[in-house]
Image (spheres, rainbow, N blue to C red):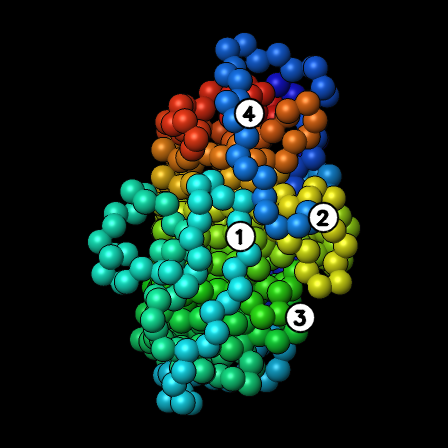
Amino acid sequence: MAIGPQNMNIRPAYLSAAVLTAAALTLTGCGQLAAQDAPGTTSDAGARSAATEAAPATPAAESKSAATDTSGAAAQAPSAAPGAGAGAAAPVAAPAAPPAAGAGAAPVVQRATAIQAQGNIAATTAPAARTAQAVGTYQPSGANTGVVAGTALKPHNTSGADLVITQDGTVLDGLEIYGDIKVRAKNVTIKNSRLHGGKGTPGANTGVIDANSAAVANLVVQDSTIIPDSPSYYRDGIVGHDYTAQRNHIQGTNDGLGIFNRPGGPATANVRAEGNYIHSLTYWSNDPAHSNGTHNDGIQVQGGENIRIAGNTVVANSNPGAGSAANPRGNHAGIGIMLQQNVAKLANVVVEKNWVDDGQTSINIDNGKYANITVTVSDNYLGRNQFDFGSGSKYPVRIISRAASTTPGLATNRWADNLSFLVEGKTGGIRYNA
């Protein structure tokens, strides 16, 4: 069925001199999709009617970007200069002895548009109980992600300057970390910590954890709470390549996770995102890259090989940041999981056993600037709370081009409320632009 055109909204990437060699490396961002069927124009034979709508979001109406689009915030390229964020960089060879111990106050958690009831962050389960559960056999929530309950966090890098990690094998554990973290080393581990992010607005696209450097390999971020004290249209949760994100609670960022291979580097992205809880992103009406406001995505994949997204809860809702106008789409963000070939062609990409809801689309598949795309999307659980484009026109799973897309496992995805399979059609859960 034809659904109208989309606009390609591009956020300028900040590339190092080494990768400024080809215009083809321009990175795009964005999460909104505009066009919809005109009421009454679509007839989808065999489409199931939607059984029930997910409960409406509890946060006040806000959050979603404007009418047309193609995929959340922008990809970031490796920074040439240390510390693109506010303040002078604070290089880290190994975690410094932190000041006096003391757990910080638990962050305020805004309730997500839940696929099922979500817990509070203070009730997080013990590490052994978490790791004993197989990915995809339980739904991540505030109760089983983020900092483990009872952890006495030690303040670290309290100046809030960029925390630049340059020593291989650095471990940050049990810390209350201030400042955006720039990883420029191998085998770095950040775990069981509360990440506050940097102060103010960064000078370019980044993340609370930025893994864009060519030096990054085998970064592990687990059991951590990532909620920036200073949300920004330039501040995602974790962004880059060669990282594993497990059981993290991510909230209030621009995008939750940004995934792509390094422009100008190898084709591999080498990212695993498992058991994370991502929700309540921050919408900005004054995004310098988009005239219609930020395009917030829970997980945005823009290119690369070897990517596994499994067993996460991604609720693509959002709330307006301080000074922002309300989102014209209420609390609906851009995309829950965006699979779009902006940076490079995707290969060996598996999206399975996730709980995804809300946004303009929960799962979006876009071949982008390439002739075709192949991604495995299987055994996911879809909610029904997407933005309504009119007369019940919603997009739980949206595929931009039928002819250009190969999607193994597509028929195995289910509705979260009754476990029936999604089918193609206006109310069936699977829709094609063309």
Q: Name the mark on residue 124.
A: none
Task: Name the residue that disc number 3 marks.
Answer: 201
Q: Is residue 362 visible?
A: no
Q: Position of residue 5 (x, y in %)?
A: 70, 31
Q: CA distance from mark 2 to mark 4?
A: 25 Å
Q: Name the mark on residue 327.
A: 2
Q: CA distance from mark 3 to mark 4?
A: 38 Å
* Left or right, 412 with reference to 237: left
Seen at 55% across and 30% down, the residue is 53
Of the numbered discs 2 and 4, the one sitting upstream in the chain is 2
Of the numbered discs 3 and 2, the one sitting upstream in the chain is 3
Quadrant, the N terminus: top right
Q: Is residue 354 above or below residue 253?
A: above
Secondary structure, mark 2, is: loop
- Front one among 135 and 371: 135
Of the numbered discs 2 and 1, the one sitting upstream in the chain is 1
Secondary structure, mark 1, is: loop
Q: Contact, CB < 8 Å: mark 3 with mark 4?
A: no
Secondary structure, mark 4, is: strand
Q: Name the mark on residue 111.
A: 1
Q: Position of residue 118 (x, y in %)?
A: 44, 49
Q: CA distance from mark 3 to mark 2?
A: 20 Å
